[in-house]
Amino acid sequence: MDLTPMWFGVYKAVKYLLYPLSWIAITGLFALLTACFPVTPGRTTWVRRFTLCTVLLLLLTATPILSAIYLALLETRYPPFQPTSTSQFDAVVVLAGGVFQKGSLRPADDVSDASRQRTACGADLWIKHLAPKLLLTGGDATVLRTGPLESHEMKRWALRLGVPEAAILIEEKSRTTYENAIETKAILGAGHILLVTAAYHLPRAVGLFEKQGFVVTPVPCGYESKHTPQQAWEQRTFFDFLPTAKALLITSQAIEEVAGMMIYGLAGKL
């Protein structure tokens, strides 16, 4: 399913409504606008309500101990991959995690940290002879398709890690996880694959690839969480209750994943 630039732009714009920062900004803006009108008992009450909502949203989404628990609930879904001496798969499939575009300070396009980490995980699996092919999936994720192809940048990194070009397959059309699965099916057909992506992204990705007929062995690559939810709470410290920008980002990732699973599920794609 190839979305037109307009619909892909709508898709990316709607995602901003999922982010906690958007919720915080909206409730804060309502509080400010209400406070600009002449003071009345009713308006004062609403200013207090909007202000309270803003503070509560900030605490619930930007507190490290809570954000760690939110994401850990996703990351504990699949344990770390432990190959056996008889493990053998048709391909290692690596999902892209973004790309940095060149600019006035950045001399060339480059893989993002997430894509670099996932490519390294995939290359390591291939080097261990767990599959004959390494498939890197990800196209141009910009709205007007004016950016670099993510899988091409990942391929450059895989080559530097020692994977020969003959072993690398490229999927360069997809822009979403659903399209990753569709386009990978077009290249590989059915088969037993090692699916490599971020640990928190696996619950959604595994479901989408299994829906396309793949037998999926998930390979979590990169954990944001240090502990399981229970251990995180047991080992909490004072600083885990101080809101941070990183915690807000982690909560945003968790919410985006859960929303993605819900939407794909309602659409019958999971």
Image: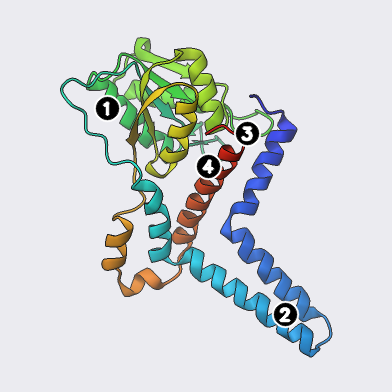
The tag earlier along the polypeptide, 2 or 4, is: 2
Q: Which residue is mark 3?
A: 142
| Front disc: 4 or 3 | 4
Q: Gap in Å between the C-alphas at discs 4 and 3? A: 22 Å
Q: Identify the disc placed on residue 124.
A: 1
Q: Quadrant of residue 25?
A: bottom right
Q: Secondary structure at mark 3?
A: loop
Q: Which residue is mark 4?
A: 261
- Residue type at the position of mark 2: Trp
- Give yes or no for contact between labels 3 and 1 (Cβ–Cβ under 8 Å): no
Q: x%, y% of residue 143?
A: 67, 34
- Give yes or no for contact between labels 3 and 2 (Cβ–Cβ under 8 Å): no
Looking at the image, the residue that sits furthest to the right is 38
Q: Describe residue 156's horizontal placement relative to residue 6 as left or right.
A: left
The tag earlier along the polypeptide, 1 or 4, is: 1
Q: x%, y% of residue 131?
A: 29, 17
- Residue type at the position of mark 1: Asp
Q: Which residue is mark 2?
A: 46
Which image quarter holds the N terminus?
top right
Can see residue 149? Answer: no
Q: Gap in Å between the C-alphas at discs 1 and 2? A: 56 Å
Q: Secondary structure at mark 4?
A: helix
- Give yes or no for contact between labels 4 and 3 (Cβ–Cβ under 8 Å): no
Q: Secondary structure at mark 2?
A: helix
Q: Residue at x 47, y 18 (%)?
A: 170
Q: In this figure, what is the number of numbered marks?
A: 4
Q: Quadrant of residue 136?
A: top left
Categorize mark 4 by other alpha carbons within 10 Å: few (<14), some (14-19), many (20+): many
The tag earlier along the polypeptide, 4 or 3, is: 3
| Front disc: 3 or 2 | 2
| Front disc: 1 or 4 | 4
